Amino acid sequence: MFQFERSEREGVTVLTVAGSLDAATAVGLKKEVVALTDGGKTRVAVDLAKLTLIDSTGVGVLISLFKRARAAGGAVHFAGLAAQPKEIFRLLRLDRSLDLHPTLDAAIEKLKG
Amino acid sequence: MAWLVAVDGELSGRRFSLDAPCLVGRGPYNHVVLDDTRISRQHAKVSPEPGGHIVYDLNSANGTFVNDVQVKRQKLAPGDVVRFGPFSFRFESEALDRTGPIKLGKFVEVHTQVGVDPPSKIIDSLDASLATNPGVAHDLAELEDADRKLRTLYMFMQSIATTLESGELFSRILKNLLELFPTASAVAVYLRELTTGMMEPRKVMRRDAAPPSLSTLPGLFHEEVVQKGRAILSAPLVPGGKGKGGTSMHAPMIFGNDVQGVLHVRAEDTKVGFNQGDLDLLTGLASQAAMALSNARMHAESLKQQRLQQDLLLAEQIQKSFLPRQLPSVEGIEFVTEYRPAYSVGGDFYDLFWLDHERIGVFIGDVSGKGVSAALLMARISSDLRVAALAESSPARAISRVNQAVLERKQHDIFVTGIYLSLDVKTKQLTLANAGHLPPFVRRKTRGELVRVEGGSGTAIGIFDEAVYEQTTIQLEPGDTLVLCTDGILEATDELGEQFGFERLELSLSSGTSRPKDVADRLQRDLREHVGDAAQYDDVTMILLGVAADPAPARLRRRDEPTQTVKPE
């Protein structure tokens, strides 16, 4: 089971993802990522607190959001990473290069204004 | 008991039962088929109702007449002559002067439910009754009626079973429903949405030209239909009296043990709806529709599988074409490679090649994603890497170049993890850079001594422009084996969903002897034991590189110069 939701807070786009993000479930989010960045939403906080599992396809979608937003002059911050996804981010050394925050509030604080 | 008895023409003397609603028209699905251009496809309907039999004209082109008076809706009295175009029928009824049940044998009991049961049951019952009561004079009209209803189901099945495309299938189902239920104003097919489990409308059709509006359709169904799989008749007719009939029918489409969808038929005229016979017919139709839908879905699935299969075959060919066919051969160094992609093609790849007379380049990598696009990217990275490796003697700088090359291609959702190292075959010293890949291990000669190489690590390739890569140097001693693998090994899952993981990997690598072949065989065996035959696991790729325990002076042979031996300085 995988779900995502988009909302706006203080001028920042918040993308909340929950459940298992893998090759089987990533298609919908991939479309959303394209829609977001094509629609000029390039300051994005991704809330990963409810993300339970991720595979390489799933990471690929989050990375594509990051790359697309940056290419358009925006920024993507990630929040609430835990459990297996946290391990994967660490293994890929993404924890060194991506902006990770313990809470969504902290991510939004960095992105707004 | 009531009949329409043909009074002229070819049909003269034929009796058509009116105990269930009777459709009259040119279409073959009618109970009374009148094959004449002056008759509309569905011309009229005669229905048994609480107050008596009613004839309805179904907006026919040439009208319906009772005793030569054109009617839209007319209650019939015995002896009335009903005319459709050139065909005249006499209405006969015996119900009024009968008191007790009619004794016509077992057959009649069955017959009164006809249209209700699936065709096979009807046939069985007919056969049984004919066999056990050979002498009973059955009412031929009754038999014909059963036959007609059976034919209706058969025609419906014929009509819908010839398409395997679900959109077309829904259209045909709905067109048939509008024809079969003349009083219906709108019909709809709902399917269970796999993600939410809710019944969602897939297609709606109205009899009039008004565009179908979903808002007038039920959003939720009674649990009788959706959970218990029973057809229901709801919204009682306004003057209907004893709660018989309704203006809304729902029949479940059941396949396997699941209610996959619902056929919905509704009438807008609250005086003219449907009775139990109609509902039973709809139930039969819904089960046929479910079967046809299931066939269409299986067909779509097999097409998808075929396309996927072709994609995978192509990817496999691409991938195999650039994996090294031959490993460098060096005295005193043993290489073992294992490459087992899941589902015939995976994201893993590796390469081993001579950098110069003394150094061998080794790469192991894993591209996110699968299929042709991943295989093509792999092929390009493979060549990028060879170019970078020859241009840069530092593995960290070589990886950095590959990172730039991958970023320039702007394939936003793909990234690569990998380890690139150069091995000096004389000194047995290696320098490696790790781009977000599973760390390598060095298995020392002594049992139990295992080192996880955490140094020289940087971010996966293809994510950051400004990524900085580091490298680390390791001295291999006689009897040491370096192990590079992809994370498919960690993720190999057993029947209970437990992953192989670091602990089991390290335990396997540190036991037994340190010879590369032994280490590889042991790891394969431990993986198989862990997974059992429960599940297919992800790609498993590994490269092992061992230094002979009792080293003779290294003698090198280049792959492209197989016979020449080069003496190290």
Image (cartoon, helix red, strand yellow):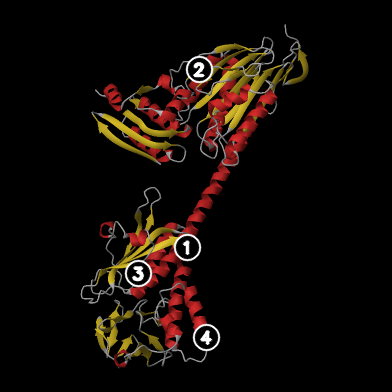
Task: Decide which of tag 3 and tag 2 comes sooner along the chain.
Answer: 3
Q: Chain of mark 4?
A: B
Q: Chain of mark 1?
A: B
Front of the two marks 1 and 4: 4
Front of the two marks 3 and 1: 1
Mark 3: which amino acid? Leu
Q: In terms of secondary structure, where does tag 1 sit?
A: helix
Q: Position of residue B446 (x, y in %)?
A: 66, 16
Q: Are marks 3 and 2 on the same chain?
A: yes
The quadrant of the image that shows the C terminus of chain B is: top right
Q: Are marks 3 and 1 in contact (CB under 8 Å)?
A: no
| Viewer-closest of A89 and B365 | A89
Reply above or below: B266 against B386: below
Q: Which residue is mark 1?
A: B291
Which quadrant of the view contains residue A89? top left
Front of the two marks 4 and 2: 4
Q: Chain of mark 2?
A: B
Tell me the distance, in whole angstroms, between the alpha carbons under discs 4 and 2: 87 Å
Q: Which residue is mark 4?
A: B132
- Note whether residue B202 is visible: yes
Residue at left offset 37%, top offset 93%: B7
- Count neighbours of disc 4 (C-alpha within 10 A) and say few if under 14, some if 14 to 19, many if 20 or more: few
Front of the two marks 4 and 3: 4
Front of the two marks 3 and 2: 2
Q: Position of residue B186 (x, y in %)?
A: 30, 65
Mark 1: which amino acid? Met
The quadrant of the image that shows the N terminus of chain B is: bottom left
Residue at left offset 65%, top offset 32%: B525
Q: Are marks 4 and 3 on the same chain?
A: yes
Residue at the far top in the pictured view: B569
Q: Which residue is mark 3?
A: B178
**B558 to the left or right of B276:** right
